[in-house]
Image (tube, rainbow, N blue to C red):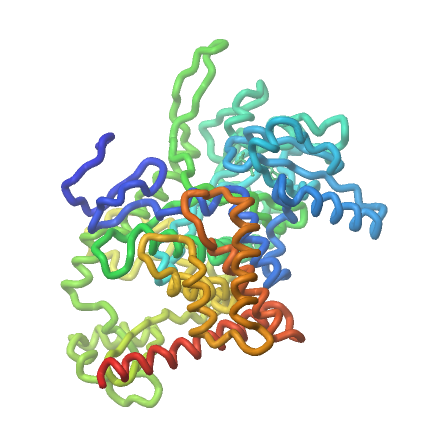
Amino acid sequence: QFPFGRRLPCDIYWHGVSFHDNNIFSGQVNKFPGMMETVRKITLSRAMRTMQDLFPLEYNFYPRSWILPEELPLFVAEVRVMKDSDPSWKPTFIVKPDGGCQGDGIYLIKDPSDIRLTGSIQSRPAVVQEYICKPLLVDKLKFDIRLYVLLKSLEPLEIYIAKDGLSRFCTEPYQEPTLKNLHQVFMHLTNYSLNIHSENFIHSDSVNTGSKRTFSSILCRLSSRGADVKKLWSDIISLVIKTIIALTPELKVYYQSDIPSGKPGPTCFQILGFDILLMKNLKPMLLEVNANPSMRIEHEQELSPGVFENVPSPVDEEVKVAVIRDTLRLVDPQKKKRKDAQGNICLCLPCPKGFTEFPCSYREGMKDKQHKHHSLKLSLKLKFYLKLGSCLRLEHVPESSESLLDAVPAERPEPDAARSPEAGLPSLCLKQVFPKYAKQFNYLRLVDRVAALFIRFLGVKGTTKLGPTGFRTFIRNCKLSNSSFSMAAVDILYIDITRRWNSMGIDHKESGMCLQAFVEAFFCLAQKKYKSLPLHEQVLSLIEFCECHLAALDEKRLLWGWG
Ligand code: ADP
């Protein structure tokens, strides 16, 4: 432990709460810059809303949410319209203060007029969300799932999911919300930190009884009742991938600001805690993402009033030790060195169509037949990007014929388990889901491409906001202004949107246009230019239009540079 920081370079830095040290120039850090901000309740809700606007069906796993106080009038109006159109709809809403955790400040309401406007809401923004009234019950109790997800790399995107998680139980039998029971936190909120104070809390040494159990024990029970557990896992994997796709644009902006490309810096990875609720019909719903999930493997037991003792918690130990052990195995710098020494990286590639042989630079590494054989088995796809003949960029995407259904956790030996020093360790509990299933999800990564445009025009390294000149250059370089959209109109668009976003602003440190404001401006331009298409097609068309103009510009610049 280095509470005051450490200057000697390390292979892995394990930060307690967040990425906070800009003086690291190599190695790997267990936190991404900006992750805490990105997964806060309000920022997550905004990111999910953007994706719901683009892909409503794909993102229906996140409850309808509004941001308070700014969207209070919208919340009131939308609920009124929905109630008018369906008088039998008797909703309940849950109000959650931004930046809160462990159930802090959360309450349920039946009507928008019940929002407590005094004090807390105005001083503390919040998210109000449709309450899921019909959760799946086990032993008549509501429970949620905490799943651990490793974001191993942002660029290229690499995601792993732990094959077991925790199920955290309420301690009062569940009833659908009524005015009478709305306040009963032990019935409605599954937080361990709350329920531990209930006299009904059961601390068990077994993983399949008590108030905290393994998720696999729940799956076993569901499976014995005939539930389609394979489909459930596949839905959960899809939820995780889609959520991370929604978060990556913002993360990339923070990343380039803290670790500018071209300068020495560390790479990052992060363990995230996904909180998921299963509906009665087994549909998983995302509640929230935790950037700093508790890794405690002890249970705090109250011996006598006010006297606590830490006792081992086998359930936590079983799940969390495996997650940390496997994270370290996956980011192990020695493993990377061993791999490099064996020369078996990016050389194990099948010939791309149209090539009978590899170009010699690839063949050099193909040391023996075993490698060749391995290459076919891996079925890696090779993409060439030849830029004016001057440089060659190589990107390989593992292709998989497996469907998401095959991702159901299964004990499988790792390919090189026999000869590696890891041979004695249990097989990995963390399963790769991206890029493994990239093909099925890549079409959702539109905002990522908008963020790439945003980052390109940020100009000054270390910033996260776009100035008016940067925005004008973006419009000019992408040839977006014309007789019906003058540069004066461009400036007005910039000022209008930036002012509004900054007035809601959580971050007042920098002036200028933040990524979400740029995304709004981009959608606005797309709607103007491609009127008749659905929103995601409008946005895709504009992205392609911009990327095409920028590629042509880069080409010209390269030629001029050479000339
Ligand atoms: P916190 O960070 O304070 O734990 P959460 O968003 O995780 O906030 O909410 C706390 C608990 O409230 C959850 O564990 C869950 O039991 C319940 N909850 C949250 N959102 C919903 C919802 N939309 N529908 C039903 N229950 C919810």
The residue depicted at 22 percent of the width and 46 percent of the height is 24
Q: Position of residue 183 (x, y in %)?
A: 68, 26
Residue 75, x across and y down, in percent: 70, 45
Q: Quadrant of the N terminus?
A: top left
Q: Toward the viewer: 457 or 52?
A: 457
- Where does the image place residue 334, in percent across and percent down from the top left? 18, 53
Question: What is the tally of numbered marks visible in this picture?
Answer: 0
**Quadrant that contains the C terminus:** bottom left
Outermost front residue = 488
Instruction: For residue 408, say whether it is visible.
Output: no
Q: Is residue 428 left or right of residue 502?
A: left
Q: Is residue 106 above or below residue 393?
A: above
Q: Residue at x 56, y 62 (%)?
A: 493
532 displayed left or right of 43: right
Q: Quadrant of residue 455?
A: bottom left
Instruction: Pinpoint residue 253: horizontal percent, then vertical percent.
Output: 40, 55
Which residue is rendered at x = 18% and y = 83% of the image? Answer: 360
Vertical placement of 351 versus 343: above or below?
Answer: below
Quadrant in which residue 181 is drawn:
top right
Residue 255 makes an appearance in the image: yes
Locate ligand 1 by image quadrant.
Answer: top right
Task: Choose between 37 and 329: the one closer to the eye.
Answer: 37
Residue toward you, 160 or 209: 160
* Residue 315 found in image quarter: top left
Name the side, left or right, on which 467 lies relative to 487.
left
Front one among 551 and 171: 551
- 451 lies above or below 40: below
